Amino acid sequence: MDKRVASTVADKFQAFLDNLAVEHTEFIMETFRTITRQLNQTYYGNRSELRYARFIGSYGRGTAIKGVANINILYEMPQRVQKRLEVWQQKAPRVLIKEVRELIEEAFPMVKLSDQCHIIIPSLHNLQFEIIPAFPGLKKSYIYPDLNNMTGWSTFNPLREIEVIEDSNFRYTGKTKHLARMMRAWRAARNVPISGMLLDTLVVSFMDEWENNDTAFGYYGIMGRDFLEYLAGRRKNQAIYYAQGSNRELPSTEDFGAYANDDFKLASQAVEHELNENYYEANRLWLQVYGPLFPVML
């Protein structure tokens, strides 16, 4: 690729990723600290604002983008509470949810339970925080209240999912998270029926296979194009995928590959226009693929 073309593409995609940055991060951290301190006072007898709590979900994986609505927080409960709850038997999950909700309510009176009995704090900036109290399990897994499960409990392993993203991102010098964020913009712009976790899982797999995974920002147009082609090649009748790291099931009920195939064609045209230095047409097509957060650089 011509150096001048690569520089122009690099500038666009660097600006694009800047535009995708999550807003209100100081407010998010302040809320996290308040929640953590409130729970730690009761469960651990200290006022730490960081220990025993972790961001999980897309924000915890570092793949969320501007406009993210849900901030998920895992809170690690002490084992003695698990012992205490044993006397409640099948009612134990509801007792735990009620107890944690009441503690959080002291700091956030607006706290509520969702239809699935998740602890939710509606907040400013169109954000809502979900707090997941959980007990440590085997191999970095956690056991959390799940009233949709007959036992009242389910197991998940969000920390391994975060580790897989972090390892891939380190191996490929930041491109894993960059691509995951770019594809969230694509998903939002084109209303693509694919979950964020499935996107992240497929990005990790793609980066291991992509022949240009050692390139820099000048290849980000090609990277997005090639990933769309990769998505388009997924079997449309595959109903279940498995998350990298945790191996949890990720249902896929609609054909996201058809959306990817259409936009692979647009991205291919955009790349050709970039190579021919027809930047106006390239920008027009990138805007179609990635939506209004893609910068118009004429």
Image: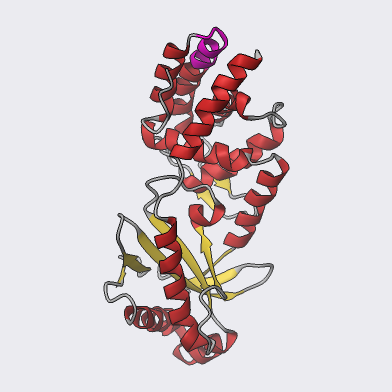
Residue 209 image-quadrant placement = top right
Numbered-mark total: 0
* Observer able to see residue 232: no
Q: Residue at x 30, y 60 (%)?
A: 124
Pick the quarter of the image with the C terminus. top left
Residue 236 pos. (x, y %): 50, 32
Residue sitting nearer the eye, 232 or 164: 164
In magenta segment, residue 266: no
Q: Residue at x 47, y 79 (%)?
A: 37
Q: Main secondary structure of the magenta part?
A: helix
Pick the quarter of the image with the N terminus. top right
Direction left: furthest residue: 110
Q: Is residue 91 left or right of residue 238?
A: left
The span shown in magenta is 268-277
* Observer able to see residue 10: yes
Residue 203 image-quadrant placement = top right
Q: Residue at x 55, y 22 (%)?
A: 9
Q: Residue at x 48, y 92 (%)?
A: 87
In magenta segment, residue 271: yes
Looking at the image, is 162 positioned above or below residue 258?
A: below
Residue 182 pos. (x, y %): 50, 35
Residue sitting nearer the eye, 98 or 212: 212
- Identify the image's colour scheme: rainbow, by chain, secondary structure or one colour: secondary structure
Residue 52 pos. (x, y %): 56, 75
Residue 193 pos. (x, y %): 41, 38
Residue sitting nearer the eye, 234 or 216: 216
